[in-house]
Image (cartoon, rainbow, N blue to C red):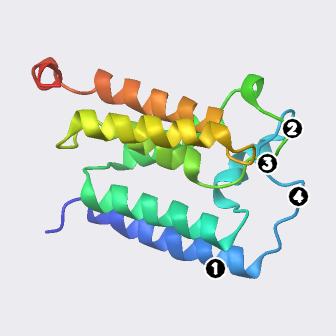
Amino acid sequence: MVRRAKEKTTVLVLTVLLIAFYLLADVGKTIGLHAGCSWGCRLAYPFLHASLLHVLGNCWCLLSLVFIYDVSWLSLLLAYVVAITYPDAFLSSANIVGLSGCVFFLFGRVALQVQRKLYYQCCMLSFIGIGFLFTNVAGWLHLYCYAVGLVVALLNTPFIERRRL
């Protein structure tokens, strides 16, 4: 039996739906996560995308994480909850759209499962740091979601495994 088959199937279906939604829907400029947005916008923003490259990149990262690492239903649900509860204090005037908040939470969540932990952390620090250089990238969202995912991973990993870091 395939390990985590339900999670993999769910992510595959979600990927197909996200790409289809992007290709069929016209996402306006007022949709997304922004300061003072409604809960409807907050709940929907991970499923909206600014460009085809954006949706494909986010979906590829999500698929890779779920198929390579041990990502449970609970981790997927928690990634969504953490992303939609991103505090307004850090929001800029630009709308945030895309699945990257969920993906960065999962990047943090699997950080203790990777083989080359120091290399992985340096890569993640680079990705997040580069995100702050571009005004249209949600650097604070990525940092917040990655940090929360890393804390969740630390709290849910046995102490003996953590000592090998």
Point out residue 132 in the picture as x, y percentages from the top left corner.
Answer: 64, 37
Which of the two labelled residues, at mark 2 and mark 4, occupies the earlier sequence position?
4
Which of the two labelled residues, at mark 1 and mark 3, occupies the earlier sequence position?
1
Question: Residue 2 or 129: which is nearer the viewer?
Answer: 129
The residue that disc 4 covers is 29
Give the secondary structure at mark 3: helix
Cα distance between the residues tagged 3 and 2: 15 Å
Q: Residues within 10 Å of mark 4 (few under 14, many from 20)?
A: few
The residue that disc 1 covers is 20
Cα distance between the residues tagged 4 and 1: 19 Å
Give the secondary structure at mark 4: loop
Q: Residues within 10 Å of mark 1 (few under 14, many from 20)?
A: few
Is 146 above or below relative to 100? above
Which of the two labelled residues, at mark 3 and mark 2, occupies the earlier sequence position?
3
Is 15 above or below relative to 58? below
Point out residue 142 in the picture as x, y percentages from the top left corner.
Answer: 57, 38
Which of the two labelled residues, at mark 4 and mark 1, occupies the earlier sequence position?
1
Label number found at residue 93 = 2
Q: Amino acid at mark 1?
A: Ala
Cα distance between the residues tagged 3 and 4: 12 Å
Q: Quadrant of residue 12?
A: bottom left
The answer to whether the residue labelled 4 contacts the one labelled 1, judged by CB atoms less than 8 Å apart, is no
Label number found at residue 41 = 3
Identify which residue is drawn at 15% across, 18% down. Answer: 159
Q: Is residue 162 in view? A: yes
Residue 89 horizontal side relative to residue 66, left or right: right
Question: Residue 6 or 131: which is nearer the viewer?
Answer: 131
Is 114 above or below relative to 25? above
Point out residue 124 in the picture as x, y percentages from the top left corner.
Answer: 42, 39
